[in-house]
Image (cartoon, rainbow, N blue to C red):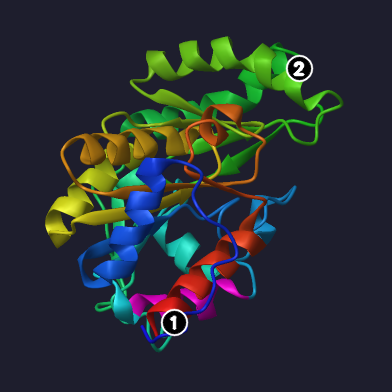
Amino acid sequence: MGSNPHPLPAHPTTPAGADGLAALLARPDKAVVALDFDGTLAEIVPDPEQARAHPRAVPALAALAPYVASVAVITGRPAGVAVRYGGFAGVPGLEHLVVLGHYGAERWDAVSGTVRAPAPHEGVAAVRAELPGFLDRFGAWRGTWIEEKGRAVAVHTRRAGDPQAAFEALRDPLNELAARHGLIVEPGRLVLELRPPGMDKGVALSEYVRETGAETVLYAGDDLGDLPAYAAVEKLRSDGHPGLLVCSGSEVPELAERADLLLPGPAAVVDFLAAVAARLG
């Protein structure tokens, strides 16, 4: 790393996080760097179809990836969509990138350029057909809209007159609707996603760390859906594996309060990753 390593723009505020960062810098070849997409590598935007990775995200990941055991993007989006919106395909340095979509139910590997996925859950199609009339009956149609996610469907309230009130009003009814069709509701920042049970970012991260044989994990996220991944890293730490929990932004207190390192948003996240890569170079 040289006698004059590049300084990092931010440092963990917890002893466990400091240990995780130190382990990553000391043995990067034994570390997995796992990242959420929306809100972590890409800014949150009113229309999710317009979300794109921060302009410095791909260069930062491409600079870091050759030093670490693996870089993985774990997202609620379909894997192929995250690859497209992230600009991850065919990038020198990211030949071994893995994208775990739909909370780990789908997997895209840069090596093959293909997505592997299970058969879709029949409850998603049933909910998709029922949702428009369901929202209309609850008087929630104005400013509320449905995002098709293939293996899931999401209801957004960001454009409603009172986004938080609409979110809270729909939470219980959508939970009941999801349960009727064998689905669960994944809450996020002004979005309620109805999806199949059995997989979350914690399960996906734990399985991937086991697959790679990594000893250290950095995980960065920004939303409620990232809490299971945080719990997975905390479990790994209790088993003797160093870990660093990064939170992008402070809109979700449940996440920010558990983070070792709080960064103000995607620009700061990618700058931190670029600085780590420079430190390793």
The residue wearing badge 2 is: 165
Rendered image: mark on residue 97: none
With 127 as the anchor, is 234 left or right in this view?
left
Disc 1 crowd, CA 10 A, few/some/many (<14, 14-19, 20+): many
With 2 as the anchor, is 189 left or right in this view?
right
- In the image, what residue type sits under mark 1? Ala
- In the image, what residue type sits under mark 2? Ala
Whether residue 169 is situated above or below residue 57 in the rendered picture: above
Q: Position of residue 36 (x, y in %)?
A: 47, 52
Q: Position of residue 150 (x, y in %)?
A: 44, 47
- Residue visible at 22% across and 72% down? 29
- Residue visible at 47% across and 43% down? 260
Q: Secondary structure at mark 1?
A: helix
Majority secondary structure of the magenta segment? Answer: helix
The residue wearing badge 1 is: 63
Q: Which residues are magenta?
A: 56-65
- Residue visible at 52% across and 33% down? 255
